[in-house]
Image (spheres, rainbow, N blue to C red):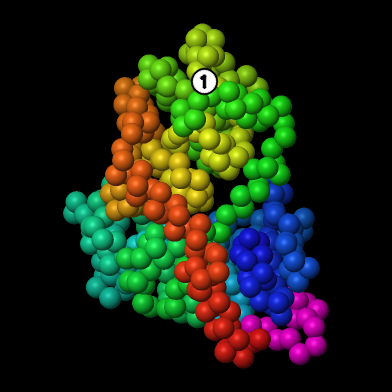
């Protein structure tokens, strides 16, 4: 959201933006610095949370913050320069209940959707089918579902895992209805990458404004000894020879799966850099942490036997590693940020989706765009992917495929040009700002 604010402020000199950031005592993510003095960060901490925010889902906690947010919006208006007026609220999908606040102030609201446009199309389509015909995707027993935002029918295995949870599904429907009433939706994608999805989304104005990436985040966070040693090790490897394995901020495996990955990598004989993290305690929502010593979970002697070709580390500066010339392939969980980063640096991907909408992203990459291979595209949580599957997947990833490489280069060039002058996303951002001005808010 801060990167979006930076982008908008850069495009319009008279635009002032306040970013409301709800932090918790367990928040660990670093907030990037605003690039312009016209961007104000307002932190709403939970040192004294409203009673309703003490427990419940993230959506319930956001809802309980409504009085604070209403007050913060009023204060932001009071700080505005003379003659400036509130143009609207931009909400992420967790904050859709704040659409009511926009109504109270008499301004439109917009959605900032940080996943793929094709994912947005899937959500809106199943909500429409449910409301118009009673379709229940949780009980869908067919092999595949045709969705207008996708060129191919989506196989049942690619549906988000939580789709079978009726309570979660009802929440998703409510969110999708708020999407439909929005003045517009800003999507972190590029029209040339997802033209089918963007063109199909006609229920409101869709603005592809990506790729919104913080490519300096890795450099800012890096600097520890393990990260420096990993980069120095990459400097000594041949160009495009290393497989990079990283599964996102919440990606971690239990010991049995770690052993299979290790055995598969060793059997492949390929160079590798593997981000290996300890999963949080079972039954909790705690995120992964770094091991004190990765040897405790790896096969005996693995580190010594592979010392010449591989490294295992904890947290890693992903963008710095993907940008390195030695990296020739990326085994990824297919989170949308990681996907866009891989595309930006032109690194081939092997998909291993784990949760949320990641199977949809993997299906998009492998079967629609045809720019990725797979380790286990239909992975189910708790399933064990064998060493043989890992070995076969990383070998296929590192094999030359001229057609796939040409398609990857085309999309990589497209997303780099999108935010340049005359680029599709640059034009879309300008259109969004003009829309805000015409609404009477600027």
Vertical order, 206 against 57 (above or below): below
**Residue occupying image coordinates x 61% and y 50%:** 215
The answer to whether one can see residue 195 in this image is yes
Vertical order, 395 against 410 (above or below): above
Viewed as shown, does residue 265 lie left or right of 85? left
**Residue occupying image coordinates x 54% and y 64%:** 419
Q: Position of residue 48 (x, y in %)?
A: 77, 59
**Residue occupying image coordinates x 49% and y 30%:** 239
72 drawn magenta = yes
Quadrant of the image occupied by residue 382: top left
> For numbered disc 1, what is the local secondary structure?
strand
**Residue occupying image coordinates x 70% and y 54%:** 32
* Frontmost residue, 162 versus 436: 436
Residue farthest left in this picture: 142
Report which residue position mark 1 lands on.
310
The answer to whether one can see residue 313 in this image is no
Q: Position of residue 337 (x, y in %)?
A: 51, 51
| Region in magenta | 69-87
Quadrant of the image occupied by residue 380: top left
């Amino acid at each position: 959201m801060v990167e979006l604010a930076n982008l908008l402020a850069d495009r319009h000199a008279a635009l002032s933006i306040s970013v409301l950031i709800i932090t918790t005592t367990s928040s660990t993510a670093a907030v990037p610095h605003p690039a312009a003095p016209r961007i104000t960060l307002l932190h709403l901490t939970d040192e004294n949370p409203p009673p309703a925010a003490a427990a419940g889902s993230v959506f319930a906690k956001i809802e309980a913050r409504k009085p604070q947010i209403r007050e913060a919006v009023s204060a932001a208006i009071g700080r505005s320069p003379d003659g400036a007026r509130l143009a609207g609220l931009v909400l992420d999908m967790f904050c859709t209940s704040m659409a009511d606040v926009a109504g109270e102030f008499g301004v439109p609201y917009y959605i900032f959707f940080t996943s793929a446009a094709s994912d947005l199309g899937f959500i809106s389509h199943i909500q429409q089918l449910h409301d118009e015909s009673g379709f229940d995707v949780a009980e869908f027993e067919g092999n595949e579902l045709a969705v207008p935002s996708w060129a191919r029918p989506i196989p049942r295995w690619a549906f988000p895992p939580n789709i079978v949870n009726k309570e979660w599904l009802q929440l998703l429907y409510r969110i999708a209805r708020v999407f439909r009433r929005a003045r517009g939706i800003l999507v972190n994608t590029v029209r040339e990458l997802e033209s089918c999805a963007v063109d199909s989304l006609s229920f409101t104005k869709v603005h592809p404004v990506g790729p919104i990436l913080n490519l300096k985040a890795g450099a800012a966070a890096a600097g520890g000894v393990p990260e420096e040693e990993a980069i120095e090790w990459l400097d000594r490897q041949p160009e495009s020879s290393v497989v990079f394995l990283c599964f996102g901020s919440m990606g971690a495996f239990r010991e049995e799966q770690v052993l299979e990955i290790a055995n598969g990598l060793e059997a492949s004989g390929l160079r590798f850099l593997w981000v290996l993290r300890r999963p949080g305690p079972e039954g909790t929502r705690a995120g992964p942490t770094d091991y004190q010593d990765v040897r405790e979970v790896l096969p005996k002697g693995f580190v010594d036997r592979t010392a010449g070709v591989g490294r295992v580390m904890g947290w890693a500066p992903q963008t710095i590693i993907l940008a390195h010339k030695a990296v020739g392939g990326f085994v990824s969980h297919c989170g949308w940020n990681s996907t866009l980063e891989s595309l930006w640096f032109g690194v081939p991907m092997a998909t291993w989706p784990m949760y949320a909408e990641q199977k949809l992203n993997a299906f998009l990459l492998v079967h629609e765009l045809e720019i990725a291979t797979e380790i286990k595209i239909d992975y189910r949580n708790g399933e064990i992917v064998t060493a043989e599957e890992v070995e076969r997947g990383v070998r296929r990833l590192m094999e030359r495929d001229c057609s796939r490489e040409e398609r990857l280069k085309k999309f990589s060039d497209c997303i780099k040009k999108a935010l340049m002058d005359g680029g599709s996303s640059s034009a879309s951002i300008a259109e969004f700002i003009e829309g805000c001005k015409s609404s009477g808010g600027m």
